[in-house]
Every structure is written in structure tokens, then in C-alpha cells.
Image (cartoon, grey):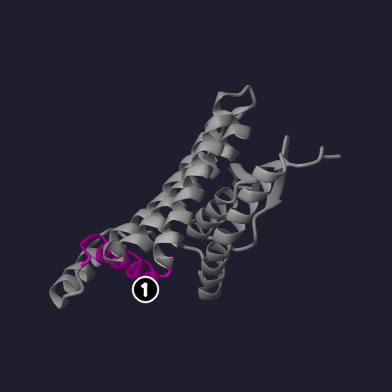
């Protein structure tokens, strides 16, 4: 019972993060500003959903933990790459 | 990265991927971890720096969720770019971790790393920067 509630809370938080962070993409702010809210949606929202799944199906923990690590690293570093590409004056340093 | 930390990281990823703790699988994982080319760095690496960066990465997770709730509840409409100094004696691996930790938290994104020892960081702020 407690496990189901905790899992549902995590998934609900993740969904709220995803919706909240994706909505500003339609606005007229700078790319960098949008990347901040996208990191809430993409990285933290998805991670909360995977944690919810981890609580719900603990027997699949190796794959879900790997998914958590991959989400954290890939989303964050892609955010950095997008931020780098969207700013002026690129050099190869 | 220090060789045994690198080996341990590869082995952990192998074990998570295969989800099999048998001796045969661990042996294959060790062989695979040893066969993959190593990242070589000529700089002196300190174990303490790696543990410190690892700890900072863990602390960044609750910090990121705290910042996410903050920017959701109180709009952060202003933007600012600052230059943050890179700590001394950073190896490429530690610089990668620094960029990861800064960018992982939603209020800050590294936009560029300058080899002269600076991270260019983009912030969102609640109040207009002075």
C-alpha cells in the first residue's frame, strides 16, 4: 500500500515536471532560458518517473538504475552541448 | 581517472547491464573493463578530489529537485551569465564532473569551458541582476 502510494507520488511528480518544463518551449524566450526548464522536464521529471517504477518493480533494479544514471548523464551533457552551440563566439577550447 | 576507480566504474556498468552476479560474468566484466582503452592524463590525480566530486554529484540530486520546486513556485524570469573559476589541478575527468554538476541543477547551465580556467555559467534569477 505504502509502496504503491510512494510510487504513484514519484510518477505524478515526474509528470508534473514534464508538463511544466515542456510548456515554456512554445514561448518566445531565449534558447538558454528554455534549456533551464527543459532540464526540469527532461532530466528531473524522467528521473522521478523511473524512481517511481523502481519502487513499483524492484526486481528490475539493475536496468532501472542504469536508466537513472544514463538519464542524468546524457540529458545533462546534451543540455551543455545545446547551450554551447546556441551561444556566439565558439572556439575549439 | 585513477585506474582502479575507472575499472570499478566500468565493472559496475557491466554488472548493471547484464544483471548477473555469477563468477563467470564478473570475470568477463573484469576482462572487458581491462580491454577498453584507458583515458590517459599526465596530470597528478588525487583520490581526495575524486571522492569530493563524487560526493558533490550525490548532493546535487536533492539540490536539483529543490531548485526545480523553487523555479516552479516562484518564477525566475531574469537571466545572467557569470564566469566561475575552475578549481586548481583539475583533470579532464574532474572538469567533466564539474560541468555535469553545474548543468544538472536547473538554475545553472555551463555554456562554455575556457581552458584558461573559467566556466561560463548561465543563470536564471528571481530578481533582476544588478
Q: Residue at x 48, y 58 (%)?
A: B93
Above-or-below relation of A51 to B4:
above
B112 inside magenta stretch: no
B4 inside magenta stretch: yes
The image quarter containing residue A68 is: bottom left
Q: Residue at x 53, y 31 (%)?
A: A85
Farthest-out residue, bottom: B23
Q: Main secondary structure of the magenta part?
A: helix
Element marked by disc 1: helix
Q: Nearer the viewer, residue B20 or A6?
A: A6
Residue A2 percent coordinates (x, y): 43, 67
The image quarter containing residue B1 is: bottom left
Residue A65 visible in rendering: no
Q: How many marks?
A: 1
Q: Quadrant of the C terminus of chain B?
A: top right
Farthest-out residue, right: B130
Above-or-below relation of A32 to A42:
above
Q: Tell me the residue that label 1 is attached to.
A: B4
Residue A28 percent coordinates (x, y): 63, 22
Farthest-out residue, top: A28
Q: Residue at x 33, y 58 (%)?
A: A64
Residue A65 percent coordinates (x, y): 36, 61
Residue B16 visible in rendering: yes
Estimate how packed mark 1 is, as few (under 14), some (14 to 19) or many (20 or more) residues with alpha carbons within 10 Å.
few
Q: Nearer the viewer, residue B60 or A92?
A: B60
Farthest-out residue, front: A1
Q: Nearer the viewer, residue B128 or A78?
A: B128
Chain letter of the residue beneath label 1 in the structure image: B
Residue A59 percent coordinates (x, y): 26, 66
Q: Residue at x 16, y 75 (%)?
A: B22
Magenta-highlighted residues: B1-19
Amino acid at each position: 500500500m505504502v509502496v504503491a502510494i510512494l510510487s504513484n507520488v514519484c510518477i505524478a511528480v515526474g509528470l508534473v515536471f514534464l508538463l511544466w518544463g515542456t510548456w515554456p518551449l512554445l514561448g518566445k524566450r531565449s534558447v538558454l532560458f528554455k534549456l533551464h526548464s527543459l532540464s526540469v522536464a527532461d532530466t528531473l521529471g524522467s528521473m522521478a518517473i523511473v524512481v517511481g517504477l523502481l519502487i513499483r518493480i524492484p526486481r528490475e533494479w539493475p536496468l532501472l538504475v542504469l536508466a537513472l544514471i544514463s538519464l542524468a548523464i546524457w540529458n545533462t551533457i546534451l543540455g551543455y552541448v545545446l547551450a554551447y552551440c546556441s551561444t556566439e563566439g565558439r572556439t575549439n577550447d | 581517472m585513477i585506474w582502479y576507480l575507472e575499472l570499478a566504474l566500468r565493472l559496475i556498468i557491466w554488472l548493471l547491464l547484464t544483471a548477473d552476479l555469477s563468477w563467470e560474468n564478473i570475470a568477463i566484466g573484469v576482462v572487458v573493463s581491462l580491454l577498453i582503452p584507458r583515458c590517459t592524463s599526465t596530470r597528478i590525480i588525487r583520490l581526495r578530489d575524486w571522492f569530493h566530486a563524487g560526493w558533490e554529484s550525490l548532493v546535487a540530486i536533492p539540490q536539483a529537485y529543490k531548485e526545480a520546486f523553487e523555479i516552479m513556485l516562484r518564477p525566475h524570469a531574469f537571466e545572467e551569465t557569470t564566469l566561475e573559476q575552475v578549481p586548481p589541478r583539475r583533470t579532464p575527468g574532474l572538469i567533466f564532473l564539474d560541468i555535469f554538476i553545474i548543468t544538472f541543477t536547473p538554475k545553472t547551465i555551463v555554456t562554455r569551458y575556457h581552458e584558461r580556467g573559467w566556466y561560463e555559467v548561465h543563470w536564471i534569477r528571481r530578481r533582476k541582476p544588478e
